[in-house]
Amino acid sequence: MQKDAAYCFVCYLFKDRGKFPGGDAFVEEGFRNWNMKGRFRKHVGAINSAHSEAKEKYDMFRRPSTSIRESVASNTAEFKVKYLARLTWSLKCIRYLLRQGLAFRGHDEGKNSHNQGNFRELLAWLAGNFEEVNKVVLGNAPGNCQMIDHKIQKQLIASCAHETTKLVIEELGDECFAILADESSDAYQQEQLALCLRFVNKNGEPVERFLGLVHVEDTTSLILKEAIQSLLIRYQLPLSKIRGQGYDGASNMKGHANGLKKLIMDESPSAYYVHCSTRQLQLTIVAVAKENTDCDWFFGQFS
């Protein structure tokens, strides 16, 4: 160590020569260029720099209780309590929006937006009216754990759907059921199949429960049958338990030779087909409306 030279104390004690390619004046030879103040900031560097690593080792040497492991262990209980509360309030907002069928996201969710969407606005309203909510969400939550990102929303929605479906399967038990299915295109013009279960619950009441959506490449009867089968298998519901089918009157659904009805009955002969009553009513209304000139004109203008 030379006189009239500056050294970095923590780097000198805990230096790792491999971290300073070509040497470092603050560690090896001493710093003498006092007019080059920018070298101080360059030596300190980013959070993963050699100086930062040496500083962490120095702090751990002086106060072992300040190590990352000890800090995490001491804060784990409090962090878990706040995390659980934050997750609970986010789930409450999500459940409310799902039950009301409301959109989650807004057009502008930036900090300066006057309307950040239903989810964030609802959470902000709760935080503004209840201190127990305010102390764990939004500005009082860690920047990387606020539970408000749209990806987190989708994960929580998927979890809600999974738990809801589990209750439906438990309600069904080992009983037989009927299936109600229909295909349609989503907003991106991708074909999808919606599947519902109809069964008698433990109170002797007929109920209908939505099971899920499956995206399909085509609406041919074979592809629809495979989509239904894959969804039922996911929840351990065999085709042999099907006792009824309810579809519209399209040929790919009720065809006697290769329709979906026939393919399902090949697996479960007791799965009798019934033309969807709502679809029949729709066809009847359309047929009647076409004979009425005023109705025909109205729906023509409406479309």
Image: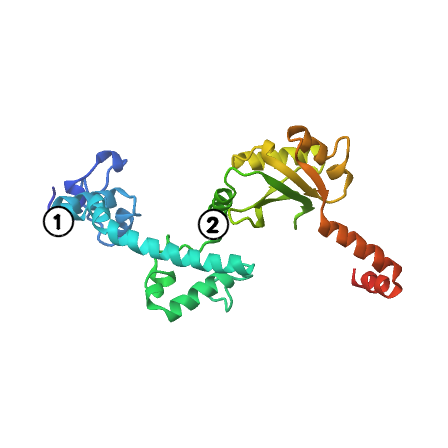
Q: Which residue appears at 45% of the width and 60% of the height?
A: 93
Q: Secondary structure at mark 1?
A: loop
- In this picture, is 300 found above or below 266? below
59 lies left or right of 87: left
Which residue occupies the foreground of this view, 295 or 10?
Answer: 295
Mark 1, residue position: 4
Q: Amino acid at mark 2?
A: Cys
Horizontally, residue 4 falls left or right of residue 150, namely left
Check the picture and name the quadrant holding the N terminus: top left
Label 1 sits on what residue type? Answer: Asp
Instruction: Examine the rendered structure and indicate whether residue 77 appears above or below residue 218.
Output: below
Seen from this angle, which residue lies furthest top?
A: 266
Q: Judge by depth and name the residue closer to the eye, 148 or 216.
A: 216
What is the quadrant of residue 294 in the picture?
bottom right
Q: Residue furthest bottom?
A: 129
Q: Of label 1 and label 2, which has the lower sequence position?
A: 1
The residue lying at 22 percent from left, 43 percent from top is 69
> SS class of the residue under badge 2?
helix
- Indicate the position of residue 90 as horizontal and vertical percent values: 42, 57
Q: Which mark is residue 110?
A: none
Measured as percent of width and height from the top left, residue 9 is found at 15, 46
Residue behind mark 2: 160
Q: Quarter of the image containing the C terminus?
A: bottom right
Marks 1 and 2 close (CB-CB < 8 Å):
no
